[in-house]
Image (tube, rainbow, N blue to C red):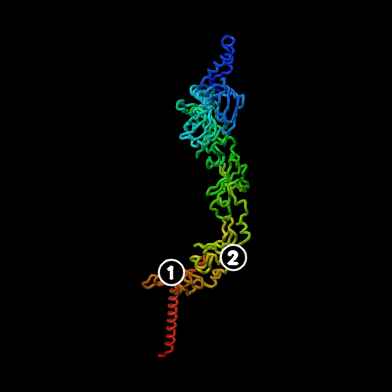
Amino acid sequence: MVNSDNNIKTEETTIPTEVKTEARHHATKAEDTTFSDLYEQSLQEIPLGQVVTGTIVEINDDTVMIDVGYKTEGRLRTSELRNEDGSIEFSIGDEIEVFVDRKQEDELILSREKAMRMRVWKDIIKAYEQGATIQGKAVKKVKGGLSVDIGIWAFLPGSQIDVNPVRDFDRYLGKTFDFEVLKYDRKRNNVVLSRKSIIEREVSQKKQGLLETLSEGKVVEGVVKNITDYGIFIDLGGIDGLLHITDMSWGRIRHPSDNFSKGDKITVKILSFDKETEKVSLGLKQLNDNPWNSITERYPIGSSVEGKVVSFMDYGAFVELETGVEGLIHVSEMFWTKKIRHPSSVLTVGETVNVMILEVDSQNRRISLGFKQTMPNPWQVLAEKYPVGTIVKGKIKNITDFGMFVGIDEDIDGLVHVSDISWKKRIRHPSEFYKKGQEVEAVVLNVDVEHEKFSLGIKQLEKNPWDDLESRYSVGDAITGTVTNVTDFGLFVEIEEGLEGLVHVSELGQQKDKTFKEAYKVGDEVKAVVKNIDVKSQKVGLSIKGFEQSSESSTIKQYVNNKEKVVSNLGNILSGIKV
């Protein structure tokens, strides 16, 4: 049917009242013509192929009898009055429009469907000529568009459904809309509709009205139309405005789709408006005061606050302290002892946590948070539990080039540095003497709470042989030892079990036509003198050259002493001879 603004009335032939009036008129004018003759004559003028209005006088299962002013009632199939559910919306006495299809003997055959079709075509033609709208219901999908019931079947092309391309036709099925008639062909019974043109006209009207009311600083309401990486486009009612991602929140937003969806209603503020280009910049965060202006007052460093975990990155977790304010817990600030690979192994999104404010940068809108700082520091507990000098036991968890890690307390391992394994033995690699999983005893050397280091020593379980070394050896003492290593810079010589001294190349002495590496081998026994003793650095300097010089000097001295003795004895002998 055509909308009320452009009502189109179907021409109707109302027979009964006019016929009877005409009959009475002729009865009074012409005495030679009877009333019944005139009435009979008028009844013969029932127009075939026209729409008339009649009154329902009888309703049966198959037939409905309708008085249309003929000498007998017209007959209509009951099925033409039934709704989809099988019910009949008419009653006896109701007036109804019908099409006078034909005469069958003295009976009129009527059609409700043809009457409706004729009315629809009149509405279609009138709507097309006057540019009016016609209402219809989208019934089913067909190739290229939708089939619409407007009283007859009409075609709605997919391109004419909406101003934007439509991919999902199903969401229009079963709904009633207003349409414009693009074209029709009555002979072929074809009608082409458009909904797009109506929407375009409505949008244009809204747009013109909106342009007159928009102004910077005004708060308006719109609907999210499209979402991009850099922001969202909002339909303000004919004009689209851009809400950039930086103007969505005073806090951090990873992607607009995390906070908004198409079709969402949203209230925003107009930041800028160019009437000529119709460009509108919108802001959401500007509806509230900037929370970062007084951030240091609300979150002093060292204070503990509560927040909600909102997202994860590989390097930490973001916690919302209030709307528009987020802080970062770096993975290094999550646990005192555990090494965190990803924050999701410790926290969950949506979880409420207590954190400590470590640093606030209001200019760059950054807050550093600490999670471990809200829990007791196990390193401080460790220092109190194991004072320096405490003997502890534990299993070796890991062996490296520089030492061994020994499990002493839960989640905390102590390091026995390679230099603290033995007083006497020169350790090249700890694996030469220890295995992973082996239980060892050690002495606590140091607990560095600030730098989170736990130092242990094994050699400290025994007395330091270097402490009384100077009481056992003096500079110039001759020793006999075994070569344990030959290096480019000299020989290492074991002077007693586990105690080595170094003979520098400059102190090796003379080798006949040989290099010192050819002259000395591991296991060779050598004699040397103690050149120097450094107890603090645990080093003993030896000299083979010094030993040789000392021996040579001793031999010469003995030779001189012996010579003097011989001369003295000879003198005594000679003095006793008398001439």
Which residue is drawn at the image coordinates 40% and 70% (left, top)?
Answer: 517
246 or 554: nearer the viewer = 246
Q: Quadrant of the N terminus?
A: top right
User: Could you tell whether 205 is left or right of 508 in the image?
Assistant: right
The disc labelled 1 sits on which kind of residue? Val
Q: Camera-side residue: 481 or 462?
A: 462
Circle 1 packing at 10 Å, graded few (<14), some (14-19), many (20+), is: some
Which percent across, then down, holds residue 25?
58, 11
Residue at left 62%, top 46%? Answer: 306
Q: Name the residue under label 2.
A: 393
Q: What residue is at 52 percent from the left and 21 percent from the top?
A: 50
Report which residue position mark 1 lands on: 486
Please name whichever residue, 192 or 308, is drawn nearer the observer in this view of the structure.
192
Q: Position of residue 294 (x, y in %)?
A: 60, 40
Q: Where is residue 276 in the image (x, y as percent from the top left)?
A: 49, 27
Compared with 503, 330 (above or below) is above
Give me the disc on residue 146: none
N-terminal of the pair, mark 1 or mark 2, is: 2
Mark 1 and mark 2: span between their CA atoms? 37 Å
Dot 2: element: strand
